[in-house]
Image: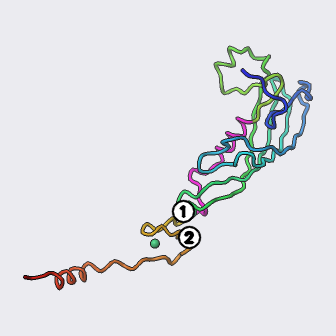
Amino acid sequence: MNGLDPRAPLVLDTRELGRRPGSQREVTRTVPAPADLGIEVLSVPEGAPVELDLRLEAVMEGVLVTGTAKAVLEGECARCLEEISEDIAVTFQELFVYDDIRDSAEAEEDDEVSMLQDDLVDLEPLLRDAVVLALPFQPLCQDDCPGLCTECGARLADEPDHTHEAPIDPRWAALTELTQDPTD
Ligand SMILES: [Zn+2]
Ligand SMILES: [Zn+2]
């Protein structure tokens, strides 16, 4: 396992807590969004600011990280392809277990457990999961987006009265055919 870089924006140093259960630290920082924070159609653009508000709390087994992250999502409406930009605020909580308390064989079996690495917390997977979980299944520009006109592709939310010439009444169509049909 590669060591974490203590200077990386999404890596938190817990050494200040001194492994004393009950000791706490608040961390507020704005970090650039990592790549692929979200899903293909809706994500926080890489490098866009993510505001983090975190509390680190030492417990017996490790460090409990609780926090919120705020950012702006960008993407496009699944129905009309209009660009969407919306604020997102997610909360998360995770226990990071001291890596020297658990033996590594046990930890490998259970990959649900997040581990501290040399008393550092890697916040990125936690942030990524929280953001992806908060995303709508289908991003829409508005809840009842009517989508695009199937005939000409106009965006119906812009033109509520959008219509096309009604197709010719089939009875008239039959008549037209009769009069035009050469009888010879
Ligand atoms: Zn739309
Ligand atoms: Zn149309």
Q: Is residue 106 part of the magenta span, yes or no?
A: no
* Span highlighted in magenta in the image: 124-144
Q: Is residue 131 part of the magenta span, yes or no?
A: yes
Query: Picture coordinates of residue 115 (x, y %)?
Result: 75, 25
Q: Is residue 42 above or below residue 162?
A: above
Q: Quadrant of the N terminus?
A: top right
The response on whether ligand 1 sits within 8 Å of label 2 is yes
The response on whether ligand 1 sits within 8 Å of label 1 is yes
As drawn, is 175 to the left or to the right of 152?
left
Q: Quick one: 16 or 41, which is closer to the camera?
A: 41
As drawn, is 74 to the left or to the right of 22?
left
Q: Quadrant of ligand 1?
A: bottom right
At 56% from the left edge and 70% from the top edge, which residue is drawn? 157
The reply to whether the C-beta atoms of the residues labelled 2 and 1 are less than 8 Å apart is: yes
**Circle nearer the N terminus (2, 1):** 1
Query: Picture coordinates of residue 87 (x, y %)?
Result: 72, 55
Q: Is residue 56 above or below residue 85?
A: above
Q: Quick one: 18 or 179, which is closer to the camera?
A: 179
- Distance, label 2 to label 1, CA atoms, is 9 Å
Q: Is residue 139 above or below residue 31?
A: below
- Amino acid type at image mark 2: Ala
State the residue position of label 1. Answer: 80
Query: Picture coordinates of residue 143 (x, y %)?
Result: 59, 62
State the residue position of label 2. Answer: 157
- Amino acid type at image mark 1: Cys
Q: Quadrant of residue 35?
A: top right
At 65% from the left edge and 22% from the top edge, which residue is drawn? 110
Q: Residues within 10 Å of mark 2 (few under 14, many from 20)?
A: some
Q: Quick one: 94 or 4, which is closer to the camera?
A: 4
Q: Secondary structure at mark 1?
A: loop
